[in-house]
Amino acid sequence: MDTKQSVVKGYGLLAKSKKGGLFSNLFTCCNPTKHANEIAVNIGYSQEVLDEVPEDANLGVGCGNPSALSNMKQGETVVDLGSGAGFDAFIVSREVGRNGKVIGIDLSDDMLQLAKRNAKKGNYENVDFIKGDIEDIPLGNQLADHVISNCVINLSNKKDKVFQEAFRILKPGGKLSISDIILERELPDFVKNSLAGQIACVSGAEQLDDYLKYISDAGFTDIKIVSKSKFPLELMLTDPQIMKIAKQLNFDMNSEEAKDIASRVSSISLTAIK
């Protein structure tokens, strides 16, 4: 099984757990919904926003609030790369209004089913979810006013292709707004080489200069880092895939070595213009 298939399978299991009553078994915390909400508030979402979206839409796997960067207007079209259970798509759907459109792209059938179920539950008529690879987006040229993504692009081993595709589907003057994980320093080999680490948004991360170069080479201009902060160790400690790595290797996640690994990882939010 290659990395992409493993990522899809890993997130598919997360989506299935939401409807199978197994969600709590994937996390070290006893109340996964509360945990997901705490993460969302910690990375920039208001409680008011969280109360508006379907509960199952927030999986607690984001690393920022890309919708807050975009200044969206009524009637605009937004594409969410790696839309998961629909959390960010539902938030921006209200910003673009009934005359606007939000299109979520995801490669996991289970995530798509969960997102569509959430859309029906919340009566989101201006949101659509379609299956697709963010490295080869199944949409036409120049149709989006905004492209957003939340802690997903780092999962790709072809980040240059992702940004090229985002550039292609944006209208001239369109805006890219993303939150993601980057590295301050290289990770130890046992993390980089772990498929579980890839699913956990860690081992696929790259250093900031390389990440920004992908965006610039795709044609984007006016690239602005809106925020950059250390990715909290306590969030890593509750990530089911990080815990999987630790268990497999008998690794103490509370050790100084774990703290050192955490210090190498940061979350960023940035914008760019086509």
Image: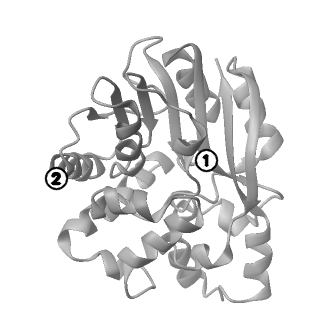
Residue 106 visible (yes or no)? no
**Nearer to me, 43 or 3:** 43
Viewer can see residue 120: yes
Measure how far apart labels 2 and 1 are at the Cα level. 27 Å
Q: Residues within 10 Å of mark 1 (few under 14, many from 20)?
A: many
Q: In the picture shown, does residue 82 fall above or below 232?
A: above
* Mark toward the viewer: 2 or 1: 2
- Quarter residue 68 falls in: top right
Q: Which residue is mark 2?
A: 121
Identify which residue is drawn at 43% across, 54% down: 6
**Disc 2 on helix, strand or loop?**
helix
Q: Which residue is mark 1?
A: 179
Which of the image's four quarters has the C terminus? top right
Residue 95's x, y, as percent?
41, 36
> Which amino acid type is shown beneath numbered disc 1?
Ser
Q: Earlier in the sequence, mark 2 or mark 1?
A: 2
Is residue 131 toward the left or the right of residue 256 in the image?
A: left
Amino acid bearing label 2: Lys
Q: Residue at x 66, y 22 (%)?
A: 273
Label annotation for residue 189: none
**Position of residue 43 in the picture relative to residue 21 (left or right):** right
Direction from residue 36 to residue 18 in the image, left or right: left
Q: Position of residue 126 (x, y in %)?
A: 26, 32
Compared to residue 177, the image places residue 231 above or below, namely below
Per the image, label 1 sits on a secondary structure element best described as: strand
Query: 143 or 108, which lies in front?
Result: 143
> Residue 114, how many percent across, how many down?
24, 53
Tell me which residue sits at (50%, 50%) in the image: 3
Give how far across and how far down residue 71 sits, in percent.
Answer: 56, 33
